[in-house]
Amino acid sequence: MDLTCTDEEEDFRARLREWLTATLPGLPPRPDPTDWPARRAYDCGWQRRLYDAGYADTHWDASPTQRLIFLEETERAGAPYVGANFVGLLHAGPTIAAEGTAAQRARWLPPILRGDEVWCQGFSEPDAGSDLASLRTRAVRDGDTYVVTGSKIWTSHAEAADWCELLVRTDPGAAPRHRGITWLAMPMDAPGVTVRPLRTLAGSTEFAEVFLDEVRVPVENRVGAENDGWRITLVTLSFERGTAFVGEVVACRRLLGELARTARENGTWDDAVLRRRLGRLSAEFQALWRLVQANVSEAQATGGVPGTGGSVFKLHYSHARQELYEAAAAVLGPDALDLDRDWTLDRLSSLSYTIAAGTSQIQRNIVAERILGLPKGR
């Protein structure tokens, strides 16, 4: 497997670096993370700059390798994260690009790329988190619309969203359960949609409960066939686990360098155990980066959708990230309790990584059954 970049890809990297160097100094200050209207405006403004410069389409129209270069270089340069555009750019958009009709791609992809419309993710429910196939939000066909009733929880960016990638049950009697699920694009301003923000341990409200009371969603907003939503969902999850965290691996590698410098400055570098800990983490994140490259190469060879190797990455990355911020706490000492430090907030956020985007237990099942070929438990 060749993990090296071609001359054309290296030229893309050089042009992107030059543009980032010229553009980043002119950006406005980052807004208060608790001010969602300001956050949305900032994140969408950055997305519009990318669009105007011709870089927005790297999420879908570029090769997987170019997409990897884009994420690597923007993170290294300290460019804004996708933020409120996370679900649209990294989940819903790639899914629609892969599975949507020509009309759906024309309707939804350009506004996502321009930063005109924000999406949220309506998958998990109070009684259907890790066991997503047990979801109970129902959609009943009524002519050219579905009438949707139920609730969702941990709905990412619901406060700021225009659209929701929504999983619903269209065949309550289907067996097994995953056969009766459908993937819909639901407008968040539709009558009957109620959003209730949830405050996280870090004090932010990027998640919410969403209540749906006979919400009407046009049938034309269905991606894929009715009751084929589980297959579409697996495409969404493959992007979520396979490529959505790529930029964060680069960020973690950069953080390791900052930790080493801080340790030398405050004297904790003299602790041989800590030095070995940081060295092991450096090796782990280097291995994760190579795994990312391998997954991208595989996706490029198989049509652009990441494979089950994304679960291997997600499983190991989640735990490595938690270990990284535990090491950061050891370097910072009492300062690790300072909530005004980005590292402290990131440490609190890292606690969710073994749950978000599929728990570690679910990832182990996927690795065991789909990669190793082990039998399902009874």
Image (cartoon, grey):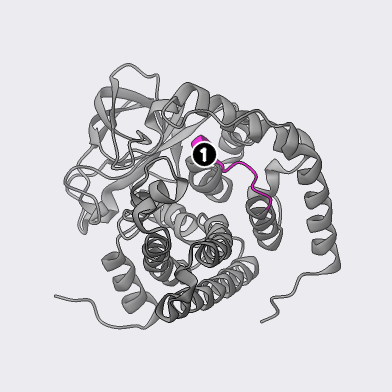
Q: Please indicate, yes or no, whether residue 345 appears anywhere in the rendered image.
A: yes
Q: Which of 272 and 223 is in front in this view?
A: 272
Rendering coords of residue 293 (x, y %): 61, 70
What's the magenta region? 77-85
Rendering coords of residue 65 (x, y %): 69, 63
Q: In the rendered view, would you say 83 is above or below 319?
A: above
Rendering coords of residue 298 (x, y %): 59, 72
Image quadrant for the N terminus? bottom right
Q: Please indicate, yes or no, whether residue 228 appears anywhere in the rendered image.
A: no
Q: Nearer the viewer, residue 340 or 352?
A: 340
Rendering coords of residue 78 (x, y %): 64, 48
Q: Is residue 318 magenta?
A: no
Residue at left offset 54%, top offset 60%: 255
Identify residue for label 1: 83
Image quadrant for the C terminus? bottom left
Residue at left offset 37%, top offset 59%: 333
Q: What element carries label 1?
A: helix
Instruction: Residue type at mark 1: give it.
Output: Gly
Dominant secondary structure of the magenta stretch?
Answer: loop
